[in-house]
Image (cartoon, rainbow, N blue to C red):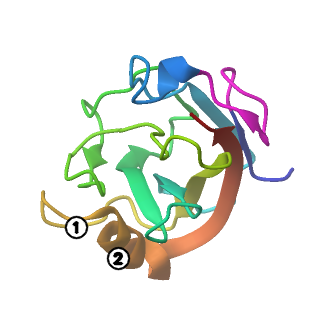
Amino acid sequence: MAFTMNSAAFTDGHEIPSKYTRDGENLSPPLEWSGEPTGTQSFLLVVDDPDAPSGLFQHWAAYNIGADQHRLPEGASAESFGQGVNDFGNRQYDGPEPPKGDKAHHYHFRLAALSTPKIDVPPQAKVADIWEAARPHMIGEAECVGTYAR
C-alpha cells in the first residue's frame, strides 16, 4: 500500500477553501493519511508555499504526532504534538495569504513518517529547522497540494 495523504476540504491540486486561509477563519484543514512505512514511530507535517515572492514560505510544522494517529481534524491544536515557528513568526498554523493579484500559489502539505518517536527541538524552533532535525529519521513521505489566489 502506498503512503498517501488527503483532505476532505480540498482535492489534491485544487483550490483550498478560504475558510482555511488567513482571509477566512485561518483553520488548518482536516487531513488523513494511510499506508505509512513499517517502522514508523511518529509523523511530522509541514505546510509551505514555494511560489512566495521571497522564495519558500513556511506556514506550519506539526511534529511528534503519534504513530497511532492517522488524521488531524479541522483546526487541529497542539494538545498532542509540537508546533514550530512559521514564517509569519507564529507557533501555529497560518493559512495561505498570497499577495493580491498574484497567480495561484501552491501550498504543499508534506507528511514525513519518522523512525523515531520524538524530535527534540527547542520550543521556538522554526519550520525549516524542524524539517532538518527530522531528515535523518525520514522513512517515507506523503504529500497533497492545494492552491489559493486572492
Q: Which residue is mark 1?
A: 120
The chief SS type of the magenta part is loop
Residue that sits furthest to the bottom in the current view: 136
Q: Position of residue 85 (x, y in %)?
A: 23, 55
Disc 1 to disc 2, C-alpha distance: 8 Å
Q: Amino acid at mark 2?
A: Ala
* Crowding at mark 1 (Cα within 10 Å: few <14, some 14-19, many 20+): few
* Crowding at mark 2 (Cα within 10 Å: few <14, some 14-19, many 20+): some
Q: Quadrant of the C terminus?
A: top right
Residue at 68% x, 41% y is 147
Q: Position of residue 69 (x, y in %)?
A: 51, 35
Q: Is residue 73 visible?
A: no
Q: Amino acid at mark 1?
A: Asp
Name the foreground residue: 57 vs 84.
57
Q: Secondary structure at mark 1?
A: loop
The quarter holding residue 87 reads bottom left
User: Would residue 74 appear left or right of 38 to someone viewing this image?
Assistant: left
